[in-house]
Image (spheres, rainbow, N blue to C red):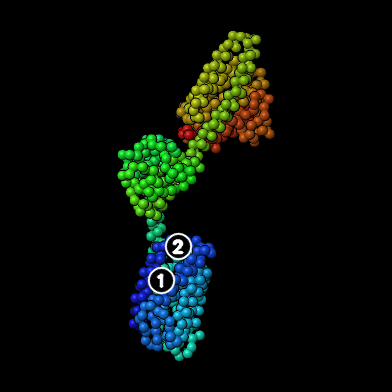
């Protein structure tokens, strides 16, 4: 029995070498990734069934208490049996592929054992598909594990030959010969099959770890390369940015040469062939046109396909990586190699990861730019809505003054010109300093004094340390205009508007109050949140001011409205001391 065990272990070494080669195939990787459907289940059944047949041929023919160490096995006589490793492939198939793969592999390997003959052909042939089916169902208890652990596989592997020996004792005849054979081959088969299954699963786990480690390394390389070239590509595809990106790529990818193009021409070429691949050359190869049209990674494996017409050019292969912004291909990164054999799975994976990272980041950058432009356009539109409101009211006053006081109308026209020039200067930026905004407000009040000189007075209380805080331009003027139009306008004299600006920790607080009639109670909950209808003007001034404060200074900068107990209204808001201008 000891000699039989050693001989089975030696032959299992050959079988495990075959298993090692099997773990390197792409079909086997699909099984590990659980990409199972009818077609792949059949393919896996055939693969593990053939592996089981190989285990049969690696077995040893036993006759009585003696055995024949012949390697190639044909028909067995009526008193012979074969000690095999058939169950190794079938059990592994069931553990990895489930019941259907285990049963399919078992049927293929079992039929082969059955046709070899011998007194135990039926029980041996029947036990193999049963074992594969049971192994597939047992694997469901470990479905959370990508590959079952070797210790568990070894434990399961012990029961496979025990089931086979049990059927042999039940079904084989004569019973005396069956008992003798079980005594001879039982323990060697339990040992060799269980150990072989454990070693096989260990090989699978090692192969899987190697693949994952390789993928992690390539992913890290892709991130590193993308991080280094994105600052160049984000500035647009120019001769300078393309040259900088190509230098980084050629160093990091170890390619023989790297080229960067736009949709029409070559922008940069670094490495081998730089003496005859010059920037400015038009893209003419079918490979370039195909990659630009499809937007997918492509490769060329001849000098002609990569677009070089010079006979002595040593660049014979290339991978083309499209540069995308959104759904549009804006250019290509071309990784050149001296021989087609240098383009392997690692290079293709790196190119794919690099293309996805660059395209995603450029698309994100483009999205952020578009959001910034849209935000800026929206704010400009809001500000444009405020300016005509004040302008039309002032022009109406000038028209009236021309008839009754031409000199005062002339003065008011001059002040309006000063105000508008100052206003145009301020609106060139989304944010201005509080000092500039107060100067803008004072220019506005110079005009208002002419219109309402006897009705109200304006007081401003400005504390030190607030002048350099940033605020959207044209914020205070519409709020003062609201106080005049809806607060103190109906007061014949004694009206007052007070502006108080003070610092509160890291914020600047603004408070505008008047002693007029106050806000209608039913409007307080919605003021600033929606445009309001108004008989005087377009009724959108406060709403637009509130929207610009929230957009540029944050939600905490929104306007707050209240009526004072003694009469009149109050508007308050705060802005941060420092605020970067949005792009």
Does dot 1 land on a helix, a strand or a loop?
Answer: helix
Which of the two residues, 524 or 99, is positioned nearer the viewer here?
Answer: 99
> What is the crowding at mark 1: few (fewer than 14 residues within 10 Å), some, or many (at least 20)?
many
Horizontal placement of 190 versus 487: left or right?
A: left
Q: Residue at x 65, y 13 (%)?
A: 400
Q: Position of residue 417 (x, y in %)?
A: 54, 16
Residue 459 seen by the camera? yes
Quarter of the rendering occupied by the N terminus: bottom left
> What is the crowding at mark 2: few (fewer than 14 residues within 10 Å), some, or many (at least 20)?
some
Q: Residue at x 39, y 55 (%)?
A: 345
Q: Position of residue 383 (x, y in %)?
A: 56, 27
Tell me the CA gap for discs 2 and 1. 21 Å
Residue 153 seen by the camera? no
Q: Nearer the viewer, mark 2 or mark 1?
A: 2
Q: Position of residue 138 (x, y in %)?
A: 50, 71
The residue labelled by disc 1 is: 198
Which of the two residues, 237 or 299, is positioned nearer the viewer here?
Answer: 299
Mark 2 vs 1, N-terminal side: 2
Q: Residue at x 57, y 29 (%)?
A: 381
- Number of marks: 2
The residue labelled by disc 2 is: 27
Instruction: Residue 278: name its quadrant.
Output: top left
Q: Residue at x 54, y 20 (%)?
A: 420
Q: Position of residue 295 (x, y in %)?
A: 47, 45
Does dot 2 land on a helix, a strand or a loop?
Answer: helix
Horizontal placement of 317 versus 100: left or right?
A: left
């Amino acid at each position: 029995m000891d000699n039989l065990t050693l001989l089975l272990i030696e032959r299992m070494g050959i079988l495990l070498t075959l298993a090692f080669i099997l773990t390197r195939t792409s079909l086997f990787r699909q099984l590990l990734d659980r990409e199972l459907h009818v077609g792949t289940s059949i393919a896996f059944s055939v693969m593990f069934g053939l592996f089981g047949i190989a285990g049969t041929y690696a077995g040893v023919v036993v006759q009585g208490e003696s055995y024949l160490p012949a390697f190639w096995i044909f028909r067995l006589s009526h008193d012979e049996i074969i000690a095999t490793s058939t169950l190794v492939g079938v059990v592994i198939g069931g553990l990895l592929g489930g019941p259907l793969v285990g049963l399919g592999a078992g049927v293929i390997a079992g039929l082969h054992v059955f046709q070899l003959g011998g007194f135990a052909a039926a029980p041996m042939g029947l036990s193999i598909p049963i074992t594969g089916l049971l192994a597939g169902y047992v694997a469901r208890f470990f479905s959370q594990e990508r590959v079952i652990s070797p210790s568990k596989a070894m434990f399961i592997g012990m029961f496979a030959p025990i089931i086979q020996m049990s059927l042999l004792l039940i079904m084989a005849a004569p019973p005396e010969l069956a008992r003798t054979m079980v005594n001879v081959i039982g323990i060697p088969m339990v040992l060799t099959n269980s150990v072989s299954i454990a070693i096989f699963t260990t090989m699978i786990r090692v192969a899987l770890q190697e693949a994952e480690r390789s993928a992690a390394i390539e992913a890290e390389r892709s991130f590193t390369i993308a991080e280094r070239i994105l600052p160049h590509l984000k500035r647009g595809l120019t001769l300078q940015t393309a040259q900088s990106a190509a230098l980084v790529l050629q160093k990091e990818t170890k390619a023989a040469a790297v080229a960067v193009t736009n949709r029409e021409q070559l922008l940069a070429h670094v490495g081998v062939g730089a003496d005859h691949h010059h920037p400015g050359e038009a893209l003419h190869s079918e490979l370039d046109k195909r990659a630009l049209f499809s937007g997918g990674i492509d490769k060329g494996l001849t000098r002609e396909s990569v677009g070089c017409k010079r006979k002595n050019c040593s660049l014979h292969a290339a991978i083309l990586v499209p540069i995308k912004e959104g759904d549009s291909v804006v250019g290509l990164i071309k990784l050149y190699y001296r021989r087609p054999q240098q383009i392997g799975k690692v290079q293709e994976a790196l190119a794919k990861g690099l293309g996805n990272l660059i395209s995603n980041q450029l698309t994100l950058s483009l999205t952020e730019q578009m959001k910034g432009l849209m935000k800026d356009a929206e704010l400009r539109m809001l500000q444009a809505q405020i300016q005509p409101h004040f302008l039309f009211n002032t022009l109406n006053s000038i028209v009236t003054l021309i008839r009754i006081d031409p000199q005062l109308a002339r003065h008011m026209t001059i002040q309006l010109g000063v105000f508008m020039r100052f206003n145009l200067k301020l609106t060139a930026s989304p944010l201005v300093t509080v000092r500039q905004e107060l100067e803008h407000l004072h220019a506005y009040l110079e005009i208002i004094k002419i219109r309402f000189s006897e009705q109200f007075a304006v007081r401003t209380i400005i504390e030190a340390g607030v002048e350099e805080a940033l605020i959207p331009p044209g914020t205070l003027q519409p709020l003062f205009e609201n106080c005049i139009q809806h607060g103190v306008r109906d007061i014949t004299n004694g009206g007052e508007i007070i502006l108080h600006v003070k610092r509160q920790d890291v914020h600047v607080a603004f408070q505008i109050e008047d002693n007029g009639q106050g806000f209608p109670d039913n409007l307080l909950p919605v003021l600033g949140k929606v445009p309001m209808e108004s008989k005087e003007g377009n009724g959108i001034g406060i709403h637009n001011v509130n929207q610009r404060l929230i957009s540029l200074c944050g939600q905490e900068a929104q306007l707050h409205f209240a009526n004072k107990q003694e009469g009149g209204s109050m508007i308050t808001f705060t802005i941060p001391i420092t605020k970067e201008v949005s792009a």
